[in-house]
């Protein structure tokens, strides 16, 4: 929607046209999420007030083996955010930057647990900015969640351990 404003500055009338439609701030949080952990959930919930919408993108790589199917991961994450209308969950199989452009993402959201995570994510941020002009927002993991990773949770599941303390509760 465009607004036309007439203003007078003592010597001239000015006509200003302003665009009243603000660009939606869409954050894109991507990963394999196999499984989606409390650490992931913390990043999404802490980023939510900063964005009009967050898209959780489940990356699918045909060369990688997953513990859960794409559909199971989508259903689980959708269940966690059933009460959050600003969150969408989608799967993608192409480059993350191409998915981001299709979704109209204005920022990537990344969680970092350590310096090692930061170095890897910084390289990704640099290439995403170069390829698509999309900035990355880094959120540092909460200290009590910094040791949780999907690979750790998968290992515990493999050995039959209870992992409920590491996974968010489903709202469904």
Image (spheres, rainbow, N blue to C red):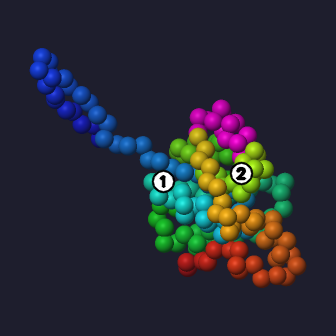
Of circles 2 and 1, the one toward us is 1
Q: Earlier in the sequence, mark 2 or mark 1?
A: 1
Q: What residue range appears in magenta?
A: 121-134
Badge 1 marks a residue whose secondary structure is helix
Would you identify the image quadrant in which residue 161 lies?
Answer: bottom right
**Tag 2 residue:** 93
Q: Residues within 10 Å of mark 1 (few under 14, many from 20)?
A: few
Residue 111 lies, in percent from the top left, at 66, 55
Q: Residue at x 77, y 82 (%)?
A: 162
Q: Residue at x 61, y 78 (%)?
A: 169
**Does the magenta run of residues contain 162?**
no
State the mark number for residue 9.
none
State the mark number for residue 50.
1
Badge 2 marks a residue whose secondary structure is loop
Q: Could you tell me how far apart the alpha carbons at marks 2 and 1 are, in whole angstroms?
A: 27 Å
Report if residue 107 is visible in the image.
yes
Residue 30 lies, in percent from the top left, at 66, 54
Query: In the displayed image of the protein, which residue is found farthest to the front?
Result: 143
Query: In the displayed image of the protein, which residue is found farthest to the right?
Result: 159
Report if residue 34 is visible in the image.
no
SS assignment for the magenta stretch, majority:
helix
């Amino acid at each position: 929607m465009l607004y036309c404003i007439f203003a007078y500055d003592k010597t001239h009338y000015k006509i200003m046209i302003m665009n009243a439609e603000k660009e939606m701030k869409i954050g894109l949080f991507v990963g394999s999420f196999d499984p989606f952990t409390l650490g992931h959930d913390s990043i999404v919930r802490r980023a939510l007030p900063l964005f009009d919408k967050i898209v959780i993108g489940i990356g699918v790589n045909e060369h990688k083996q997953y513990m859960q199917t794409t559909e199971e991961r989508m259903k689980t994450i959708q269940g966690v955010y059933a009460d959050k209308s600003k969150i969408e969950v989608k799967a993608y199989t192409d480059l993350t930057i191409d998915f981001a452009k299709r979704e109209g993402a204005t920022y990537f959201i990344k969680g970092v647990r350590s310096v090692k995570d930061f170095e890897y994510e910084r390289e990704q941020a640099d290439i995403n900015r170069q390829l698509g002009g999309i900035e990355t927002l880094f959120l540092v993991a909460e200290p009590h969640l910094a040791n949780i990773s999907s690979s750790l949770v998968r290992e515990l599941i493999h050995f039959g351990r209870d992992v409920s303390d590491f996974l968010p509760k489903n709202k469904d």
